[in-house]
């Protein structure tokens, strides 16, 4: 079987959950299940300088992982007008002659790439994983209004409030374009029931959707931190430092705990690249006002276990509908209970009072109250640790994907 993976970035350049899982899945299929293929990651000048002569670049020593340099992208229409850059992938696809093309994101690649691969590999079955809500929401796929309110799904009137300068026809055309772009895909995968519900509520046809959870490497869990006094008061944040992931909420919660004399320690782990100057001013201010908090910065997947070893709790205070954040599975792999906003796919993955705690969204005082309960309630941490079930492994995810690929290929043979 020959499979082409397309993603909007490479985990060596930006270690987001989508990139990490997609590359892990690709390598697992290649190394353990005899799948041949290519992992093609789109990047921009923000990640890698353009090299004259080709839009295709190598990364590391892997010959089956390549970068496609594309630097012109319309984020509203998910459109990539760089036809020269797109044409450079034609020889790669023609030589690979993939049986399956699995698209893990349309960012940077654009709907034009989806059309191109249909024409270059008409025999291939197309699979798309909707790791987020970009096909539904022009507001950065967040389903979050410009004034910070949660949005249950796109409507013309609602979307016009987020884009008051856009004519209604732009929003109608975007919706039609998204549906047309994915019309020929044999399967659309989502990693959570919550995400499935958002797409179905928006009127997408249910027959092509399947819930396909992501997986994490089957690594041995790191030891729990020694706590001679029995206090489980070390909190860790893992992921992108941005407004949507709730780092500002967490810093304010830590500030409130310190103001109430609650001893604790908070470490924020993650890169803050590509953030606005205004956000970084807010973040630096929040960090300065939270004496128990520290910011470590970006980390690699290889560094994650050692960082996890230093914390008792993983906190995910997102202010938007997360789909299925990989950090939940990473926390559970290392047997750390999760404190999360009680909304979206995260609340689906974390069972309140069983393997974690839910906190009110966008409410620093409410989050601080839950963190204080986590510290002060005797036996709570141990009970939640006992409630953690092993997360799905990359191997299990690979087998599920392999079955789906085979079924899709069988429909072509028929």
Image (cartoon, rainbow, N blue to C red):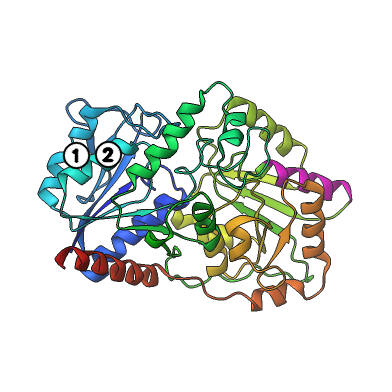
As rendered, which of 47 and 41 lies closer to the eye? 41
Q: Is any part of residue 58 visible from this angle?
A: no
Task: Tell me residue 131's x, y (percent).
Answer: 45, 52
Relative placement, left or right, of 308 versus 79 is right
The residues colored magenta run 248-260
Q: Residue at x 58, y 30 (%)?
A: 160
- Which residue in the structure is indicated by mark 2? 113
Q: Is residue 337 visible?
A: yes
Classify residue 186 as left or right of residue 193. left
Q: Residue furthest left?
A: 95
The quadrant of the image that shows the C terminus is bottom left
Residue 111 occupies which quadrant of the picture? Answer: top left
Where's residue 153, x and y in %? Answer: 57, 46
In which quadrant will I find the N terminus? bottom left
Q: Main secondary structure of the magenta part?
A: helix
Q: Is residue 9 above or below residue 344?
A: above
Find residue 104 and report its horizontal and vertical position in percent: 36, 50
Dot 1: few (<14), some (14–19), or many (≥20) neighbours within 10 Å?
some
What secondary structure is marked by label 1? loop
Q: Earlier in the sequence, mark 2 or mark 1?
A: 1
Tell me which corner region of the image, top left, top right, bottom left or bottom right, holds residue 410: bottom left
258 left or right of 113 in image = right
- Between the residue at mark 2 and the residue at mark 1, the CA separation in whole angstroms equals 9 Å
Disc 2 is placed on an element classified as helix
Front position among marks 2 and 1 = 2
Answer whether labels 2 and 1 touch (C-beta < 8 Å).
yes
Q: Are there few (<14), some (14-19), or many (20+) residues within 10 Å of tag 2?
A: many
The residue tagged 1 is: 89
Q: Residue 215's spot in the image, x, y percent?
A: 44, 65
């Amino acid at each position: 079987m020959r499979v082409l993976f397309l993603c909007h970035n490479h985990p060596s350049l930006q270690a987001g959950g989508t990139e990490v899982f997609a590359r892990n899945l690709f390598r697992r299929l290649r190394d353990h299940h005899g799948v041949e293929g290519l992992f093609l990651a789109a990047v921009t000048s923000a990640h890698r300088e353009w090299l004259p002569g080709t839009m295709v670049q190598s990364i590391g020593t892997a010959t089956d992982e390549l970068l496609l340099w594309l630097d012109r992208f319309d984020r509203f229409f998910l459109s990539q007008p760089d036809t020269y850059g797109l044409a450079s992938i034609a020889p790669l696809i023609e030589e690979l002659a993939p049986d399956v093309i699995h698209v893990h994101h349309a960012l940077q690649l654009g709907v034009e790439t989806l059309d191109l691969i249909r024409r270059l590999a008409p025999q291939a079955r197309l699979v798309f994983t909707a790791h987020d809500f970009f096909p539904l929401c022009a507001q950065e796929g967040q389903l979050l209004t410009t004034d910070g309110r949660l949005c249950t799904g796109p409507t013309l009137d609602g979307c016009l409030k987020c884009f008051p300068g856009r004519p209604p026809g732009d929003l109608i055309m975007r919706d039609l374009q998204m549906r047309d772009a994915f019309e020929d895909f044999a399967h659309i995968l989502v990693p959570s029931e919550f995400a499935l519900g958002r797409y179905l509520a928006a009127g997408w046809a249910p027959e092509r959707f399947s819930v396909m959870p992501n997986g994490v490497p089957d690594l041995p869990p790191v030891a729990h931190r020694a706590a001679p006094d029995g206090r489980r008061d070390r909190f860790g944040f893992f992921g992108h430092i941005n407004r949507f992931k709730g780092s500002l909420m967490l810093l304010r919660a830590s500030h409130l705990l310190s103001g109430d004399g609650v001893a604790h320690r908070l470490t924020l782990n993650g890169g803050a690249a590509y953030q606005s100057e205004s956000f970084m001013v807010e973040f630096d201010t929040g960090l300065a006002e939270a004496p128990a908090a520290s910011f470590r910065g970006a980390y690699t997947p290889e560094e994650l276990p050692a960082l996890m070893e230093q914390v008792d709790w993983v906190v995910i205070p997102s202010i938007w509908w997360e789909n299925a954040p990989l950090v939940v599975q990473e926390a559970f792999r290392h047997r750390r209970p999760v404190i999360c906003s009680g909304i979206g796919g995260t609340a689906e993955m974390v069972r309140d009072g069983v393997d974690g705690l839910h906190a009110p969204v966008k409410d620093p005082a409410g989050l601080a109250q839950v963190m204080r309960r986590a510290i002060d309630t005797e036996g709570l941490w141990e009970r939640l640790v006992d409630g953690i079930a092993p997360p799905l492994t990359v191997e299990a995810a690979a087998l599920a994907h392999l079955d789906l690929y085979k079924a899709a290929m069988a429909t072509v043979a028929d």
